[in-house]
Image (tube, coloured by chain):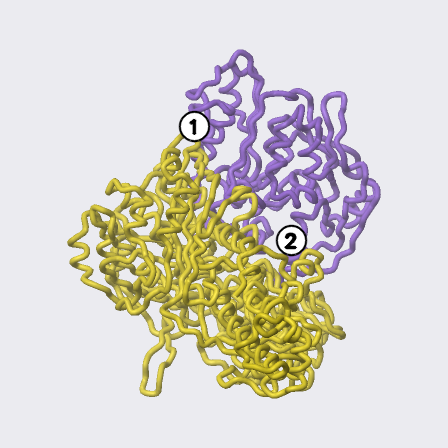
Chain colours: A purple, B yellow
Amino acid sequence: MAVIHDMIPDFELYQPESLDGALEVLDRHRDTAWVLAGGMDTFDWFKDRVKRPEAVVDLGAIPELSGISETDGGIEIGAMTPLTEVVENELVRERYSILAEAAETVATPQIRNQGTLGGNLVQDTRCWYYRAGWPCYRAGGNICYADTPESMNREHCIFDASRCVAVTPSDTAPALIALDAEMVIRGRRGERTVAAEDFFVGPAIDITRMTVLQPNEVLQSVRIPDTWAGADFYFEKVRDRNAWDFPLVNVASAMRVEDGVVQDCRLSVGAVSPVPLRMDRCEELLRGQRISEDIATRIAELGVIGAKPLRHNGYKVPLMRNLIRRAIRGQAPV
Amino acid sequence: MAKTLVGTDYVPPDLIEKITGRAKYAEDWRAEGMLFAKQLLSPMPHARVRNIDASAALEMDGVEAVLTADDLAEYMGEAGPLDERSLTNHPKYEGEPVLAVAATSEKIAADAIEKIKVDFEPLPFALDPLDSIAPGGADSLPDGNSIVRERTDTGVETVVRRVEWTAEDLATARGSDGEKGRMPEGVFQDEWTNGDLEKGFADADYIIDEPLFFQSVTHHPMEPRSCMAHWDGETCHLYPSTQSVAFTLLAGQGTVGVPPQNLVVHAEYTGGGFGSKIVGTSNMAVPVYLAKKTGKPVMHRVTRYEENYIGRARPGFQGWAKIGFKKNGRISAFDWAVIQDNGPYGRQSDMGTSGNMVSLTYQPESMRHRGLSIATNTPPRAPQRAPGGVQMSAMVEPLLDRAADHLGIDRLTIRQINIAKNGAKFGDGEGRNVTTAYVTEAWDRLAEMVDWEDAKARSGQMNGSKVTGVGLASSTYTAGSSGFDGLMLITPEGRLEIHTGIGNLGTHSYSDTARVAADLLDVPWEKVDMVWGDTGKGVPHTCVQAGSQTTHAITRATHAAATEMQTKLQEIAAQVHGGSASQYVVAGERVYRRGNRAAGLSLAQAAERAIEMGGRYDGTELNEGLSPITLGGAAVLKGRGLLAAAKDNYGRAGDVYSWVVAYAEIELDKETGVIELTDYKAVTDCGTVLNPRSLGGQLHGGAVQGFGCAVGQKWVYDPQWGIPFANRFYTARPATILDVPLEMEWDAVNMPDPNNPVGSKGIGEPPMGAGCASLLCAIQDALGQDTVAYLPLMTDHIINQLEGREQDSEFLAAHT
């Protein structure tokens, strides 16, 4: 556990001006390196001396990682693009408003100015035991402090616990899953792409990481296809206060609806599992259905089947159910 | 007296400094050769330090000293077993400072802390008062679980005792078999009864018997309690974050072991305190004695994380209210019992005050108050904005609505029928009375502002999945003390220099109160110089900037000194121009014979004359009865002009209390539990309004603090390890600007209190309770009238309520 707080220890700071340069440094330092984006996740870890990398690679001076551009099949957003820019970008707002809405619920205006899209996606979990430096499974130990009979786990998961019960804190991740986005990853050996829903990994796969990123890799950009451009979108985040708060549950949906009948849809829920969940079973049931309160309710009930709440987070089950219901029926009146 | 300044908006003298960033808060000070301190905090909720090995740290380049509790004992004398010191070998909460390191940089100090080996012996700990008083429950202190003051042959002694309730009493209190808890008998420490409680309940047509819960809440002022210190020979210069400058000096012997004559306090700006920095802060001895040990200035910057631990907190209450209402809504009996989560040090007054607040606010025909204070291994408590009053308002106001609903009475009516009026009696044996209470007028004004009939019609209206809820609440608290000194000078430049020893917390009261003198002496505000925030520049004995005392107390003291100044001006004029002093008037920056403006002196000339005359005019001779600190302050100013120093000897016919009544309107989403506060309005009785803009800031700022308390802020402790998690701003969740309506309204009845020369009363305290309670009432209105007796009402609690689910935490469990 942290002995001293709020004092960043020494490290070597690298500020490469190219992605290749950054990757070279990361490859050299491997497990002892840390990738710095906006710093909104990083500096808490450093100040409490829980994470103590030898080398910090600041991506802030790499132009190719920032900006939003139109591509043949949609748009591409550099991972270092500030969240505020994502919120305000005309292309995003016109075609993929769900992403702008999700990004706008992140933290505070100040944090959105500094925080990046990539940072919001790859940030670490907010489990307070883990972040306080307790030697839990995720930190390399052999216990989950948040999953004992007396643990305080109001914010933790109701699905997919596997030794660890922490949840994904990202607001933009469910939106990008709903948009069928692709994560572009760069390493020394080149580029690889991963579907947004496969970008995140749960503790059953790797308990020490939240994403598929390897220590010598960088999230370069996010590609959003035009498949869902201009679709019917829904995003909602429930949190305890309107600023600087992570989701208790968030939901995102994209739907193509004709004459009230769902032609196709994608639905994702965050903060209920270690990874943002794609609700593919709900999607399957929803396709071909005429949207109604009854259908929304029935599919939402199915969506929470299998939830296993912990001692203090039983409320997440009805909350998730209600948010799925709202995502299906959109803004239609009750 | 001309009233051109009192009651009008103005630009406070510190505004430019603040908005340009030139204002120096505690951690902005720098001195040549200054070292930085960092602390090692206890990792356990209760432990004894068996050994400290700092050898590796002391060998580091840049490390200059390590300070331990043993060092403090050498400098300040041995601390009593129940005393709180800046450092301890017996930490009683996780996060209590054990030692400190001074180094040439904070980074080196932090690195050094990591190299120090401390051998802790873990001790049993208690986090929850009800758990502690259960049979066989853990004690928070070696000798028991309650700090009490007992009368002995030699006086009053503070001791620790174990309090234990029977299993039956606990079952009654907590509830069992699905039944809610109800009023327990148990063991209490404070108890008083007014009237015939049994008859009161017999006369009642409706009785509520409810358990109630109010969480412990950290103060979290924007500025943490950083502090710098350096020594100049035997004189210690202290640069703390403090609410009160003069009283930080006076309390110096107790807080840092330095008597007032050897201490200079520099504190021009403080970023809030809310009661947590009344006479400075608990960590001040760290820089003071590291500076002593090293012979260099030492800065101790306190982080938000550390602030959570050493920054004080409001005591939580596990409570019960049994209230009997007559058909017309009049309260015939009020049985009030609270267990106070006291933290590990001292004995907080909240529980006792809460009983007084019940008595005053609702004027019950009969009443019993009982209180029990249980020490826990959680951060130290201190008064926080209306201590005891906020808890009471938040816990009881929703119950009034429930009774009104049951009895078919309007919610405004039930409050008006139980209202306090001018001279209202209250407390144990109703031995106290207030001066003024224009609460009826405040409710009338609020009802008009919100159009109460219209607002009621909105209650329960659905907008999609959202339901509208409306709530009313009142809150009262002390609003002034008396008996302090004023100190001022007219300089040969013709300027009025007003010295004050109160702190500058951002409320503007340090200068609001000075405007009384400018009005009385008819000096334009542009020719008034405020001197504050530095005891080396001469300060009078002024009240602590706490408990909303300042406005009332210091307008009185300032008025007293200004009156003396007026008298001295008249005497000087009479000596120069003949006749009697009473023939002269002070106006238009002159003192002159009534009807003949030419026969007189300018203020500048009078000041020059005073210097020539000496004696009682230039401060060489001072009035009897002045406090030593005022005498010291006057000595600094002696010979610089015409000096006036006077004690407030005005009479007072009771205790001064201010009031706020408030209206909150919300939309509650029944599918997500999300609450949106859509409207808030408040009306106050705080006597004569001194500074309207600042008053509005207090009414709304206090309310926002209350909103956070109602729906967001709480501690979360892991009960197995005794360690808290909500220890930074984002986890502690105080309300933000995005959680409140952009526009909120306020008004004041503006009725003068005759016990003050300008009619003013303080206002800092009651806005928080009114904001907190009115929001809770609005939530209860939206959820249904049998819901709210618990704070904070966070999303999970509301969803569970809406879904008919059992709550995820036990109702009266603390820190969950």
User: Which residue position holds label 2?
Assistant: A45
- In the picture as drawn, the residue positioned furthest to the front comes out as B595
**In the foreground, A255 or A272:** A255
As drawn, is B742 to the left or to the right of A230? left
Residue at 30% from the left image edge and 56% from the top image edge: B362
Q: Quadrant of residue B488?
A: bottom right
Q: CA distance from mark 2 to mark 1?
A: 38 Å
Report crowding for label 2: few under 14, some 14 to 19, many 20 or more residues within 10 A (C-alpha).
Answer: many
Q: Identify the secondary structure beneath mark 2.
A: helix
Query: Does the rendering let one see residue B58?
Result: no
Amino acid type, label 1 = Glu
Find residue B717 and report its horizontal and vertical position in percent: 47, 56
Find residue B302 and report its horizontal and vertical position in percent: 61, 65
Vertical relation: A206 (above or below) B698: above
Vertical relation: B421 (above or below) A260: below
State which chain disc 1 sits on.
Answer: A
Q: How many numbered circles are shown?
A: 2
Residue at 56% from the left image edge and 56% from the top image edge: B8
Disc nearer the start of the sequence (2/1): 2
Q: Identify the secondary structure beneath mark 1.
A: helix
As drawn, is B397 to the left or to the right of A233? left
Amino acid type, label 2 = Trp
As drawn, is B62 to the left or to the right of B95? right
Residue at 59% from the left image edge and 32% from the top image edge: A174
As drawn, is B165 to the left or to the right of B609? left
State which chain disc 2 sits on.
Answer: A
User: Which residue position holds label 1?
Assistant: A301
Find residue B237 and report its horizontal and vertical position in percent: 65, 78
